Image: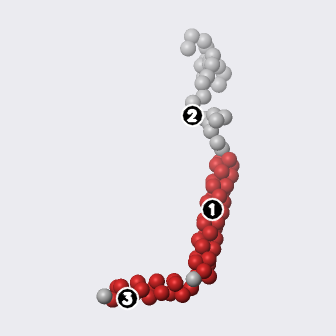
Amino acid sequence: MQKEKQANGYYHCESSITVGEKNSGDPDDAELLKLSKRLVENAVLKAVQQYLEETQNKTKETEGSPAKTEGAVDGNENDNDS
């Protein structure tokens, strides 16, 4: 403040420090959007794979012994009636 004011009315500035701006380590919006899309795609793929595995397992169970599964269901119903 010992120097004269500048023509624009402000005092002379020897140096300045910027606070609160993004630094190079912070991801920008485009990068966050890309990452979130990838996470959603991975989650959907994982869910589809799990669904396919479960339906294949059920198909194998029913193809392997359909009478046994029906008997198990009938047995369960009879147990509940008693």
Q: Foreground residue, 66 or 57? A: 66
Tell me if label 3 and label 2 are in contact, CB under 8 Å: no
Left or right of residue 79: residue 33: right
Residue topped by disc 3: 78
Q: Which mark is residue 77?
A: none
* Badge 1 amino acid: Lys
* Badge 3 amino acid: Asn
Within-10-Å neighbours for mark 3: few <14, some 14–19, many 20+: few
Look at discs 2 and 1 and give the one toward the viewer. 1
Q: Quadrant of the C terminus?
A: bottom left
Within-10-Å neighbours for mark 2: few <14, some 14–19, many 20+: few
Within-10-Å neighbours for mark 1: few <14, some 14–19, many 20+: few
Residue 16: x percent and y percent?
Answer: 61, 22
Q: Foreground residue, 56 or 23? A: 56
Q: Residue at x 62, y 82 (%)?
A: 63
| Marks 3 and 2, how far apart at CA | 71 Å
Residue topped by disc 2: 20
Tell me if label 3 and label 1 are in contact, CB under 8 Å: no
Residue topped by disc 1: 46
Residue 78: x percent and y percent?
Answer: 37, 88
As helix, strand or loop, the secondary structure at mark 3 comes to helix
| Marks 2 and 1, how far apart at CA | 39 Å
Look at discs 3 and 1 and give the one toward the viewer. 3
Q: Residue at x 56, y 85 (%)?
A: 66
Mark 2 or mark 1: name the one nearer the start of the chain. Answer: 2
